[in-house]
């Protein structure tokens, strides 16, 4: 073959060679995207598997089958896919830049970006594992706000659990990022694309990403409801992508500062529903006290669920002292907490304002100053006041709210004598209750003294035996309740020897409920039921040892108490007098993104994010029940949103 022929042959091969080069370069770019995409799907499921393994004892206790557990993964796929598409937008832009510039640092940026996302997601997963045991929810914007006080978060957790979660976080991040670098990451060098390949990449890929992050081409984009599939809350929590849920929570909260997300109907229609709900034929009350100016001792029980109380259906042996107190008082056996956080409970008890989704009114001083105040109304009627708490009131912005309520004296952990024994979260209940017995004797009568207990909150380090050997995942909780119950018995025993005792009304009420040994669904009414007890010699003899069964909430305490004292309560528009035979039979509670609504003939719970009705008994007219509950939440949130 001549030199000319060889050159001609080589020249003829050039287009073929270049075509193959461009093909493999294009393939390299596409495979780079697919490899990263595959990594995220596997990573999400790895994190999900760690969560499931961590909570496997609860899965066993709830008798969830292996098939149901495995169903988490296919139900999670579409939301994982959407989340991966969101994450892949930036790497795609980097690949486009790499295809026209050949800059080596772009590869490093991609690696660092992936590391940051893996780090953040691993941290969120560990945090979610930490909060689920207490709150039964995924990580939300509300939880992120608590990061302003990391010391309080540490104190609220058992030391062993805290460090275990740190280890899980470190392990999840390290293993995942190592696998990404060694298996999935590929450095792209000299990836110049021809015009057609570049145009195809820049047109087709964004379309695929857009369809993916929307969850398809349907009109309504994908949301968390895509992963809801089980009556077991823990399975739904595991299936919903943590990153997607957190993004939506933050996005929705930022957006909701400018509009009300819970407008279900025309405001006039909601107002009409509320008028019917709150209608009272006669403004009267059952007189249960033998005096109109008793001293008042309000004990707010941290995280007490109705399941702790035998008379409310709980197992015997957890709160024997409370059972004894019932014989000298009135037990409210159909009472519900409107929220699931302590700061929400404070606004309900002192401000008569129901809890609501997304945020808490106590964290926004510009809003809570517009609330009425039980404390201020009592002080106007001549009461002196005091508030005691063995921990730190900064959590949930409770301190500023308590200060707003105008208590004459406020004592938190640092204000008590340094000699009092304390645990990680604060001074143990026996010492704060004992201190209050002595302290209120020095107050001018009549007095209103409130104490918030601390020991029935993790880390369960109370100085008391733990004799209850049952309760499974909530064994520590019920033993802590046994301790606080013991402290209540000692408290009443000491108080009964004081001269102010006979003219004192004692009120025991929980700030919110807690998961119990029964592991009821966190959306159910049973989960939100709490105890409230009026006790003392000031209660008329014929009412002692009785139960009061009217449906109500802890935010009804203000109107109920003020009516007994003949103090007007018109400012507490959401609080009803439970001792008025004509007041309505209803109760409400908020969830992370919805509500529960209870009537004697039925109840339902609704989650807006998932557009999901959880559980409701079959009433005669379900549509009217739904309208009532949604009108109530719309009105509550509308009041919260007001400037």
Image (cartoon, rainbow, N blue to C red):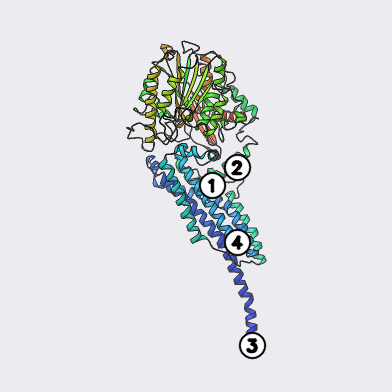
Q: Please state which of the two labelled residues, at mark 1 or mark 4, is closer to the viewer.
A: 4
Identify the mark nearer the N-term, 1 or 4: 4
The Cα atoms of the two marked residues, 3 and 1, are separated by 64 Å
- Residue marked by disc 2: 251
Element class at badge 1? helix
Identify the mark nearer the N-term, 3 or 1: 3
The Cα atoms of the two marked residues, 3 and 2, are separated by 69 Å
- Residue marked by disc 3: 3
The Cα atoms of the two marked residues, 4 and 2, are separated by 32 Å
Which of 437/47 is in front?
Answer: 437
- Residue marked by disc 1: 243
Q: Is residue 548 visible?
A: no
Mark on residue 105?
4
Q: Is residue 5 visible?
A: yes
Q: Characterize the local packing of mark 1: few (<14), some (14-19) or many (20 or more) Cα atoms within 10 angstroms.
A: many
Q: Position of residue 196 (x, y in %)?
A: 66, 65
Q: Are marks 3 and 2 in contact (CB under 8 Å)?
A: no
Position of the N terminus by quadrant: bottom right
The Cα atoms of the two marked residues, 3 and 4, are separated by 44 Å
Element class at badge 4? helix
The Cα atoms of the two marked residues, 1 and 4, are separated by 27 Å
Identify the mark nearer the N-term, 3 or 4: 3
Q: Characterize the local packing of mark 2: few (<14), some (14-19) or many (20 or more) Cα atoms within 10 angstroms.
A: few
Q: Characterize the local packing of mark 3: few (<14), some (14-19) or many (20 or more) Cα atoms within 10 angstroms.
A: few
The Cα atoms of the two marked residues, 1 and 2, are separated by 12 Å
Q: Please state which of the two labelled residues, at mark 3 or mark 2, is closer to the viewer.
A: 2
Mark on residue 473?
none
Q: Please state which of the two labelled residues, at mark 3 or mark 4, is closer to the viewer.
A: 4
């Amino acid at each position: 073959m001549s030199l000319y022929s060889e050159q001609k042959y080589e020249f003829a091969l050039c287009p073929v060679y270049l075509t193959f080069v461009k093909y493999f370069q294009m393939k390299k770019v596409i495979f780079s995207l697919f490899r990263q995409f595959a990594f995220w799907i596997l990573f999400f499921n790895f994190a999900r598997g760690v969560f499931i393994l961590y909570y496997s004892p609860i899965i066993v206790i709830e008798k969830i089958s292996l098939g149901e557990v495995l169903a988490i993964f296919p139900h999670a796929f579409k939301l994982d896919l959407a989340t991966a598409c969101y994450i892949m937008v930036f790497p795609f832009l980097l690949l486009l830049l790499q295809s026209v510039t050949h800059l080596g640092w772009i590869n490093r940026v991609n690696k660092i970006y992936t590391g940051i996302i893996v780090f953040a997601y691993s941290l969120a997963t560990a945090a979610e594992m930490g909060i689920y045991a207490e709150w039964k929810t995924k990580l939300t914007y509300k939880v992120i706000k608590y990061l302003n006080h990391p010391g309080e978060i540490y104190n609220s957790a058992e030391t062993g659990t805290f460090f275990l979660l740190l280890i899980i976080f470190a392990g999840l991040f390290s293993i995942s990022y190592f696998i990404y670098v060694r298996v999935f990451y590929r450095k792209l060098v000299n990836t110049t694309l021809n015009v057609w390949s570049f145009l195809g990449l820049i047109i087709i890929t964004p379309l695929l990403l857009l369809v993916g992050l929307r969850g398809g081409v349907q009109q309504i984009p994908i949301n968390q409801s895509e992963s809801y599939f089980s009556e077991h809350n823990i399975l739904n929590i595991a299936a919903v992508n943590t990153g997607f849920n957190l993004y939506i929570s933050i996005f929705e909260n930022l957006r909701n500062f400018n509009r009300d997300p819970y407008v279900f109907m025309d405001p006039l229609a909601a107002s009409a529903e509320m008028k019917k709900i709150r209608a009272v034929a006669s403004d009267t009350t059952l007189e249960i006290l033998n005096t109109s100016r008793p001293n008042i001792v309000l004990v707010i029980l941290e995280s007490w669920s109705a399941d702790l109380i035998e008379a409310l259906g709980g197992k015997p042996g957890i709160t024997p002292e409370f059972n004894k107190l019932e014989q000298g008082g009135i037990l409210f056996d159909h009472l519900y907490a409107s929220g699931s956080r302590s700061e929400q409970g404070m606004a309900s008890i002192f401000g008569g304002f129901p809890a609501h989704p997304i945020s808490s009114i106590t964290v926004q001083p510009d809003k809570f100053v517009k609330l009425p105040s039980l404390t201020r109304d009592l002080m106007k009627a001549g009461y002196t006041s005091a508030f005691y708490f063995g921990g730190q009131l900064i959590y949930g912005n409770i301190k500023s709210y308590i200060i707003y309520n105008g208590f004459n004296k406020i004592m938190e952990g640092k204000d008590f004598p340094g000699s009092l024994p304390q645990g990680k979260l604060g001074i143990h209940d026996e010492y704060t209750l004992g201190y209050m017995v002595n302290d209120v004797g020095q107050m001018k009568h009549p007095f209103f003294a409130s104490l918030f207990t601390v020991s029935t909150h993790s880390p369960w380090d109370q100085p008391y035996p733990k004799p209850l050997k049952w309760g499974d995942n909530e064994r520590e909780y019920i033993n802590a309740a046994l301790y606080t119950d013991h402290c209540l018995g000692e408290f009443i025993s000491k108080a009964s020897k004081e001269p102010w005792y006979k003219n004192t009304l004692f009120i025991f009420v929980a700030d919110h409920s807690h998961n119990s040994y029964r592991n009821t669904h966190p959306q159910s009414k049973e989960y939100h039921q709490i105890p409230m007890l009026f006790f003392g010699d000031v209660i008329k003899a014929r009412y002692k040892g009785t139960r009061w069964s009217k449906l109500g909430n802890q935010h009804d305490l203000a109107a109920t108490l003020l009516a007994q004292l003949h103090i007007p309560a018109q400012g507490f528009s959401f609080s009803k007098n439970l001792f008025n035979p004509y007041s309505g039979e209803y109760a409400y509670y908020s969830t992370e993104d919805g509500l529960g609504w209870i009537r004697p003939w039925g109840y339902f719970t609704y989650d807006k994010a998932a557009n999901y009705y959880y559980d409701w008994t079959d009433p005669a007219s379900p549509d009217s029940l739904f309208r009532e509950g949604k009108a109530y939440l719309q009105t509550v949130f509308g009041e919260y949103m007001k400037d």
